[in-house]
Amino acid sequence: MMKRRDFTLALGAAALIGPQSAVALTESSAERLISNLVGDINRVIASGKSEKGMFREFERIFGNYSDTSYIAAYAMGVDARRASTSQKRAFSKAFQTYVARKYGSRFREFIGGRLEVTGVKKVKKWFEVSTVAYLKGQSPFEVTFQVSNRSGKDLFFNMFIEGINLLLTERTEIGALLDRNGGDIDKMIAALKASA
Amino acid sequence: MLWASTRNRLTRHKVFCWGILLLASSQFGSVARLCLLIGAVSLSGCAASGPDLDPHNGIYDPNEAANRKVHNFNRGLDRTLVRPASKGYTSVLPDEVEDSIGNFATNLGTPSVGINSLLQGDMQGVGLSATRFLLNSTLGLFGLIDVASEFGVDEHDTNFGETLHVWGATEGPYVELPFLGPSTQRDVAGKVVDLFTNPLSYALDSPESYYSPAASIGSGLGTRGRYADTIDSVLYDSADSYAQARLIYMQNRRFELGQEDQSAEIDPFELDTQGF
């Protein structure tokens, strides 16, 4: 458990250092990444920007803090094996916008609420950072981030909201979108762009 | 978990049957109710066989075709009735009134939470729900105000579906119920039994006995309205709303029950991300 004062300190320190600096992944660097992320999300929520402006901010945040290539590759699943390099690149780009929009509109429900980092634990080669979301008129609920330095940087590669897992949810969605387009990757990317 | 080890399987079943008898004899006089209970419990399949989980999502859904038909029905019902009604409900009622109706419904369900906690051997849950019910029914003006949460007595929620889980019943196949939505065979049995686990339903005469279902409907509409964007995005924006609703329900339910989930298998170092 992290005390609020430590949390504020960590946030301050993280603001100075930024998310990219850590080389070795440690409990404190994983926690710092998420504290920073939470700080950024809370700032966007509090900014009172237009919906469009918020989505742009969330897309930037998603790009800065998450392992976007891993999340995109996971979401595409086994179909990635038959995708060309340009298809992978186009998918990755469309997917980032789609995710920012989808989860960004979820965070809109966070207006007047906040996320707090509550703990961190090591799991195999990565870390799990627990946070609690306090929303208006709702019992607090758990949001967990998984952080790794697979890419050479500390980045989160998965997120759970009350046990609901971003990677599995998006793999199901992309799989369904592929089925709907007769397995055609280009058509699936176009549909993803249209939905975002 | 209380009776987790397989060594205790026999004991567990004995306790399980004893619990059912106790429930039946103390609360429900009539033979018909007892039959319904036993039927519901055997439906849950105490000794259901190990199912073939889909390797992609870890879900056992042998009745997918039938479930999809129900899903389409539910989606139509939501689009034509529930969604517009919830919009009206949340736009007409001020947030405070909605919260009060939600609190009232939750409070009426608290005795059932207490009984299920007892059946699970969860004494902390029993204490929490008893304290909450007493505080909210008195200081909270018949449950309209959740004073217990303000005093730091956190909400505790459970149901007979969880009791069956604690007693060792397996999850069973995934089921989508008409009107009620995603569930599992075990939770369906739990829902049937929970119609009878609330002592209030025996203590109240009409019209008070209708307060609870009426408040539950109101509370449900309030929830549908409050999470409108999230629920809309699952039902209407996803490429396959059936698969999405199923996955979300199963992950969240297993999380609530403290079960290990499929994602434990995800290892970020074991995937080729070249090109992404």
Image (cartoon, rainbow, N blue to C red):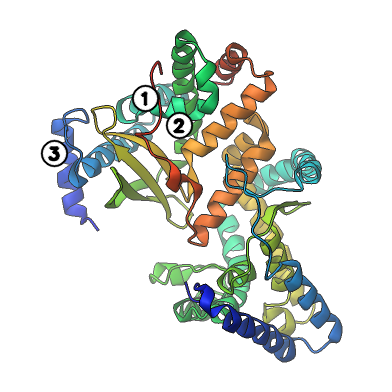
- Disc 3/disc 1 C-alpha distance (Å): 22 Å
Label 3–label 1 contact, CB within 8 A: no
The subunit carrying tag 2 is A
Dot 3 or dot 1, earlier in sequence = 3
Residue that carries the numbered disc 1 in the rendered image: A57
List x then y, in percent, for residue B45.
71, 67
Residue that carries the numbered disc 2 in the rendered image: A104
**On screen, residue B260 above or below A48:** below
**On screen, residue A189 above or below B235:** above
**Horizontally, is A146 left or right of A104 in the view?**
left
**On screen, residue A141 above or below B165:** above
Q: Nearer the viewer, residue B265 or B77?
A: B265
Q: Quadrant of residue B30?
A: bottom right
The subunit carrying tag 1 is A
Label 2–label 1 contact, CB within 8 A: yes
| Picture residue at 67% right of the left edge, 18% below the top | A181
Number of numbered markers: 3
| Picture residue at 74% right of the left edge, 83% below the top | B202
List x then y, in percent, for residue A59.
39, 24
The image's mark for residue A13 is 3
Tag 3 secondary structure: helix
| Picture residue at 58% right of the left edge, 77% below the top | B9
Question: Which quadrant of the rendered structure holds the C terminus of chain B?
Answer: top left
Mark 3: amino acid: Ala
